[in-house]
């Protein structure tokens, strides 16, 4: 099985969200079960600087508005997975992130920049490919790669394509005036094509023209076929329900292993949980919380946005503190939510602490040191932190949506509440606080979670089954 995996970000080279985690792990996991999976990625400065060695492989012609582009070849860092880098300095050699400039504004020519990536993927999957290798499946990911199945269609190429949605909220919407720059035919701009409420949607292009569709959890696959989580695309997705598959993401079980985590002061496992309390002490000390081994300590790591339900947590903080609990938060996001988090910490010194920003070591320390982990997301396509929490014996408290509903079993491995409201969250917290007082019952919950297997091996096997069905 040969697969070209097209993506706009991949850890550890460039990351803005969960797509990068999947792109860095799934191709490697596929390789372990015999799939010849090769990754195609834009040549951002950080990619060119941190992938060594990169060698010139061939020239690519036929990209929109680009006489010639260079295709470089290397390997994903830390693996032998083949990495192709699309080197077009005019499109990718600029400061900022993959989608935004240093001021946080979208690059004005994003439609063209990612049309280049999509057309390159289509060319490499076609008989016109200059490679001595041709994939049997083109696997596209999120809106930046959404035009690739459209290009295959209009090129008359029969290579099967898979479009994976990691978060339907990001759709790559642009005015219809950019259509000529993307070298798509006028007839593509219709309801049966790339048109989306008078604009052009790169994600819709992939959802319409790809042979098969997938998303990152079974529950999310059902949720996006109706409003509101269909985000205006629920009709198209429902019409393709028979071609839409939900495959749960995995986690890196080597990086996230409490028995061998270099970020922790003490190692522990399901067989011996005694040193988890030392991780709690270390977390309390680092974050300036009161050194109280009996206080139920709740952790939260998330983008500070409305989607992630930070407002629900802030609404119940007083109740947590009143019941003797503590809370530590890590993340960054909306300025108003960041201010509210800081104000809450100032109101409850020694009981509530935060770090506004991102700290990889601290994220591991929160997973290990907290007793319970909060994920009140209004929607969550898959989620990874609840799976990290289960592996670390940190009981997750989650809203029943997307991958959270697929990975946490209420009363068995964690606590699940059905409505995204502060009241429902508080009822789940009260259950958790009551059970926490029964240490034997709480330990059973911890061990149940630690026995779950969310490694990438399972997910990779599901993708291989899907690929085989496509060809």
Image (cartoon, helix red, strand yellow):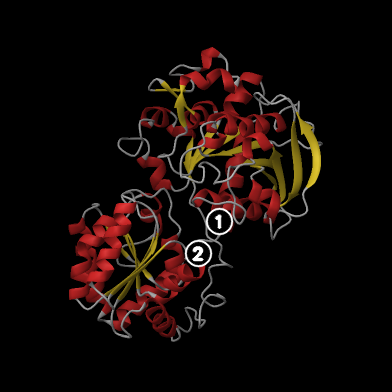
- Residue at image point 38% right, 53% down: 333
Q: Nearer the viewer, residue 77 or 242?
A: 77
Real-space Cα distance between discs 2 and 1?
8 Å
Rendering coords of residue 436 (x, y %): 27, 77
Where on the picture, by quarter, is residue 211? top right
* Residue 67 - label: none
Structural crowding at the residue carrying mark 2, measured as other residues with C-alpha within 10 Å and reported as few (<14), some (14–19) or many (≥20): some
As drawn, 183 above or below 38: above
**From where the camera sits, is residue 305 visible?**
yes
Image-based side of 67 in relation to 284, left or right? right
Q: Quadrant of the N terminus?
A: top right
Disc assigned to residue 453: 2
The answer, for residue 471, to whether it is visible in the render is no
Question: In the picture, residue 159 is in which quadrant?
Answer: top right
Give SS at disc 2: loop
Residue 28 figure quarter: bottom right
- Check disc 1 and report its element: helix, strand or loop: helix
Circle 1: is it few (<14), some (14-19), or many (20+) Cα within 10 Å?
A: some
State if disc 1 and disc 2 touch (CB < 8 Å).
yes
Q: Is residue 191 positioned above or below 340 on the image?
A: above
Image quarter where the C terminus lies is: top right
What x and y, as percent, mark residue 166? 48, 44
Q: Is residue 270 left or right of residue 465?
A: left
Residue at mark 1: 458
Residue at point 40%, 40% (across, down): 169
Q: Give left or right: position of 5 versus 58.
A: left
Counting from the top left corner in percent of width and height, residue 427 is at: 19, 63
């Amino acid at each position: 099985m040969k697969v070209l995996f097209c993506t706009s970000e991949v850890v550890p080279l460039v990351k803005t969200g969960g797509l990068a985690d999947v792109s860095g792990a799934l191709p490697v996991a596929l390789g372990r079960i015999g799939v010849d999976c090769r990754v195609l990625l834009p040549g951002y400065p950080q990619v060119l600087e941190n992938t060594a060695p990169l060698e010139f492989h061939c020239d690519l012609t036929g990209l929109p508005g680009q006489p010639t582009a260079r295709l470089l070849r290397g390997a994903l860092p830390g693996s032998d997975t083949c990495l192709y880098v699309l080197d077009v300095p005019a499109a990718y050699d600029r400061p900022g992130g993959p989608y935004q400039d240093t001021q946080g504004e979208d690059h004005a020519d994003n439609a063209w920049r990612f049309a280049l990536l999509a057309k390159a993927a289509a060319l490499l999957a076609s008989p016109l490919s200059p490679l001595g290798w041709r994939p049997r499946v083109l696997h596209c990911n999120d809106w930046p790669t959404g035009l690739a199945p459209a290009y295959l269609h209009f090129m008359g190429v029969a290579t099967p394509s898979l479009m994976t949605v990691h978060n339907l909220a990001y759709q790559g919407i642009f005015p219809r005036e950019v259509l000529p720059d993307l070298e798509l035919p006028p007839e593509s701009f219709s309801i049966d094509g790339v048109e989306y409420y008078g604009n052009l949607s790169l994600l819709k292009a992939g959802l319409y023209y790809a042979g098969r569709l997938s998303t990152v959890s079974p529950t999310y696959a059902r949720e996006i076929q109706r409003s509101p989580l269909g985000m205006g695309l629920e009709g198209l997705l429902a019409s393709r329900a028979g071609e839409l598959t939900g495959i749960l993401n995995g986690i890196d079980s080597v990086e996230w292993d409490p028995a061998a985590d270099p970020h922790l002061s003490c190692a522990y496992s399901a067989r011996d949980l005694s040193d988890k309390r030392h991780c709690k002490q270390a977390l309390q000390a680092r974050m300036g919380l009161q050194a109280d081994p009996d206080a139920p300590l709740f952790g939260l790591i998330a983008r500070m946005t409305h989607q992630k339900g930070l407002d629900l947590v802030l609404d119940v903080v007083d109740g947590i503190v009143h019941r003797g609990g503590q809370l530590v938060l890590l993340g960054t996001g909306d300025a108003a939510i960041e201010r509210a988090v800081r104000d809450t910490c100032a109101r409850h010194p020694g009981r509530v602490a935060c770090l506004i920003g991102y700290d990889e070591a601290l994220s591991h320390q929160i997973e290990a040191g907290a007793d319970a982990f909060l994920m009140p997301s209004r929607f969550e396509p898959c989620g990874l932190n609840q799976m990290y929490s289960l592996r670390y014996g940190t009981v997750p408290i989650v809203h029943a949506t997307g991958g959270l509903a697929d990975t946490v079993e209420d009363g068995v491995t964690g606590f699940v509440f059905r409505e995204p409201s502060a009241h429902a969250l508080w009822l789940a917290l009260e259950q958790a606080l009551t059970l926490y007082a029964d240490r034997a019952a709480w330990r059973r919950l911890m061990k149940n979670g630690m026995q779950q297997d969310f490694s990438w091996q399972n997910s990779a096997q599901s993708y291989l089954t899907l690929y085989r069905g496509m060809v």
